[in-house]
Image (cartoon, rainbow, N blue to C red):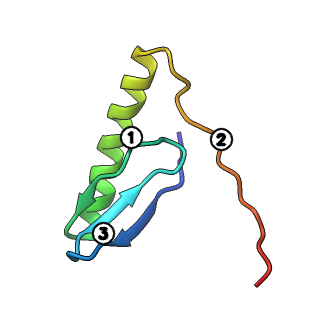
């Protein structure tokens, strides 16, 4: 399964990873490598929890164009 993730530094310098298709899946790390490793682990856990609770595995994510 391939999913889009985002990486963004917070105010403390931690690199926050987020998977927009899986709400609540937002781990952190000190480095990009650590953040990506943590998001993969978090995604697996979130997918297992969602499946165990009869929830859809992910939500719809769409790309939109915005004129600036």
Q: Residues within 10 Å of mark 1 (few under 14, many from 20)?
A: many
Relative to 59, say whether 48 is above or below: above
| Mark 3 lies on residue | 32
Could you tell me how far apart the alpha carbons at marks 1 and 2 are, in whole angstroms?
A: 16 Å
Residue at image point 26% right, 59% down: 28
Residue visible at 70% across and 52% down? 62
Estimate the x, y position of residue 44 in percent, counting from the top left.
Answer: 36, 35
Disc 2, SS: loop
In this orientation, which residue lies closer to the viewer: 12 or 63?
12
Measured Cα–Cα span from mark 3 to mark 2: 26 Å
Task: Report if the CB atoms under discs 3 and 1 are less than 8 Å apart.
Answer: no
* Relative horizontal placement of residue 61, taking residue 14 as reference (left or right): right
Give the residue at x 38% y 45%.
Answer: 25
In this figure, which residue is indicated by the disc labeled 2? 60
Quarter of the image for the C terminus: give it.
bottom right
Tell me if mark 3 has few (under 14), some (14-19) or many (20+) residues whose alpha carbon lies within 10 angstroms of its own. Answer: some
Query: Marks 3 and 1, how far apart in space?
Result: 16 Å
């Amino acid at each position: 399964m391939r999913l889009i993730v985002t990486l963004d530094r917070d105010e403390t310098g931690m690199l926050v990873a987020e998977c927009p298709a899986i709400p609540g899946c937002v781990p952190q790390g000190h480095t990009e490598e650590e953040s990506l490793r943590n998001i993969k682990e978090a995604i697996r856990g979130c997918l297992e929890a969602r499946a165990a609770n009869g929830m859809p595995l992910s939500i719809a994510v769409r790309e939109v164009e915005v004129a600036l």
